[in-house]
Image (tube, rainbow, N blue to C red):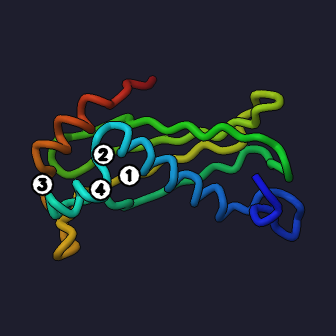
Amino acid sequence: MGPDHIDGLQHVNNAVFVSWCQDAGWAHSQQLGLGLDDYQRLDRAMAIRHGEYDYIQSAYLDQALLVGTWLTANDGRLSMERRFQVIRACDGVTVLRARWQLVCIEISSGRPKRMPAEFKDIYGSAVMAID
């Protein structure tokens, strides 16, 4: 991370963590085989309905961070859950945990709409059970 990620308190700004979660979520979706072009073609998207961010520790300039994400639930109809963890590489300490509750929407109207088969198949097969 660089100086543009650091706020007046000399640590990574909380909004930066939100942005990194967004980036990780998109990268994971693309790795699974669903990118923005697919969303537009299907006129469907997974939109954040609710987000929770637990800021556990601070991170500072030039500290390497690892951002992980995984899917923890998918009802195959409307909703899905995605979780995140950010770890400080130098000591393995978790600095952030986050959770998104997502809802499938029709892009053209913005209204909730059932998941297309591709979403059910691709996202559903990527769900990891957690305790």
- Quick one: which residue is furthest to the front in this view? 37
User: Residue 43 appears at what percent x and percent y?
Assistant: 16, 64
In the image, which is nearer the foreground, mark 4 or mark 2? 4
Mark 1–mark 2 CB contact (< 8 Å): yes
Estimate the spatial distance between the alpha carbons at disc 1 and disc 4, rounded to whole Å. 9 Å
Can you identify the residue that label 2 sits on?
80
Element type at mark 2: strand
Mark 3–mark 2 CB contact (< 8 Å): no
Mark 4–mark 2 CB contact (< 8 Å): yes
Of mark 3 and mark 2, the one earlier in the sequence is 2
Can you identify the residue that label 1 sits on?
101
Task: Tell me the crowding category of disc 2: few under 14, some 14 to 19, or many 20 or more residues within 10 angstroms, Cα based.
Answer: many
Of mark 4 and mark 2, the one earlier in the sequence is 4
Mark 4–mark 3 CB contact (< 8 Å): no
Give the residue drawn at x 87%, y 70%: 8
Q: Which mark is residue 114?
A: 3
Q: As shown in the figure, which amino acid type bears the numbered disc 4?
A: Met
Element type at mark 4: strand
In the image, which is nearer the foreground, mark 1 or mark 3? 3
Can you identify the residue that label 4 sits on?
46
Q: As shown in the figure, which amino acid type bears the numbered disc 2?
A: Met
In the image, which is nearer the foreground, mark 1 or mark 4? 4
Q: Is residue 97 above or below residue 17?
A: above
Of mark 4 and mark 3, the one earlier in the sequence is 4
Based on the displayed image, in which of its 4 quarters is residue 28 positioned? top left
